[in-house]
């Protein structure tokens, strides 16, 4: 889940890989991490969004999509619950504390938004 944090959570596949039933996997995961796999993944996505809000020149909507949320409303609610601030408030509070914003194309590459191997190649004569 830490490697593919922007992908949709497929509990059945993860549980099968661990050779557990879905329900046993969720119980075992919660016993170890203190939260369900969905809660854990949501927390990790918000942590990634925090980093991008501080460093990337992308809109809140773009960041929402890049970190794996399909709904801006859900993203904003979970972000505020975890950080105490809305994504826009968080950015306003943390931007300008040092490093310049990273251009959006580089942030998208870092977040897995596109792959340089799939990028169009310009042919020169």
Image (cartoon, rainbow, N blue to C red):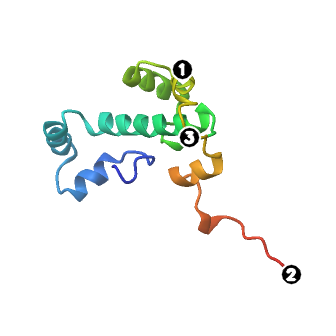
Disc nearest the viewer among 2 and 3: 3
- Give how far across and how far down residue 15 sits, in percent: 23, 51
Q: CA distance from mark 1 to mark 3?
A: 18 Å
Q: CA distance from mark 2 to mark 1?
A: 49 Å
Q: CA distance from mark 2 to mark 3?
A: 39 Å
Residue occupying the far right of the picture: 125
User: Which of the two discs, 1 and 3, labels the residue nearer the N terminus?
Assistant: 1
Residue in view at x 58 percent, y 61 percent: 115
Residue occupying the far front of the picture: 98
User: Which of the two discs, 2 and 3, labels the residue nearer the N terminus?
Assistant: 3
Query: Is the residue marked by circle 3 packed among few (<14), some (14-19), or many (20+) residues within 10 Å?
Result: few
Q: Which residue is mark 3?
A: 99
Q: Tell me: residue 67, above or below residue 76.
A: below
Q: Which residue is mark 2?
A: 125
Q: Secondary structure at mark 2?
A: loop
Q: Secondary structure at mark 1?
A: helix
Q: Which dot marks residue 49? A: none
Q: Is residue 119 left or right of residue 74?
A: right
Query: Is the residue marked by circle 2 packed among few (<14), some (14-19), or many (20+) residues within 10 Å?
Result: few
Disc nearest the viewer among 1 and 3: 3
- Give how far across and how far down residue 69 sits, in percent: 49, 37
Residue in view at x 61 percent, y 40 percent: 101
Q: Which residue is mark 1?
A: 89
Query: Is the residue marked by circle 1 packed among few (<14), some (14-19), or many (20+) residues within 10 Å?
Result: few
Residue occupying the far bottom of the picture: 125
- Give how far across and how far down residue 46 sits, in percent: 42, 34
Q: Is residue 82 left or right of residue 87?
A: left
Q: Secondary structure at mark 3?
A: loop
């Amino acid at each position: 889940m830490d490697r593919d944090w922007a992908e949709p959570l497929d509990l059945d596949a993860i549980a099968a890989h661990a050779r557990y039933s879905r329900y046993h996997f969720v119980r075992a995961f919660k016993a170890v991490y203190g939260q369900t796999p969905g809660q854990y993944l949501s927390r990790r996505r918000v942590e990634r969004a925090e980093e991008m809000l501080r460093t990337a020149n992308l809109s809140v909507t773009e960041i929402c999509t890049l970190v794996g949320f399909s709904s801006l409303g859900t993203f904003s609610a979970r972000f505020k619950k975890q950080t105490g601030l809305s994504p826009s408030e968080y950015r306003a509070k943390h931007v300008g504390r040092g490093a310049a914003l990273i251009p959006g194309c580089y942030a998208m590459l870092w977040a897995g938004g596109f792959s340089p191997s799939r990028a169009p190649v310009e042919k020169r004569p």
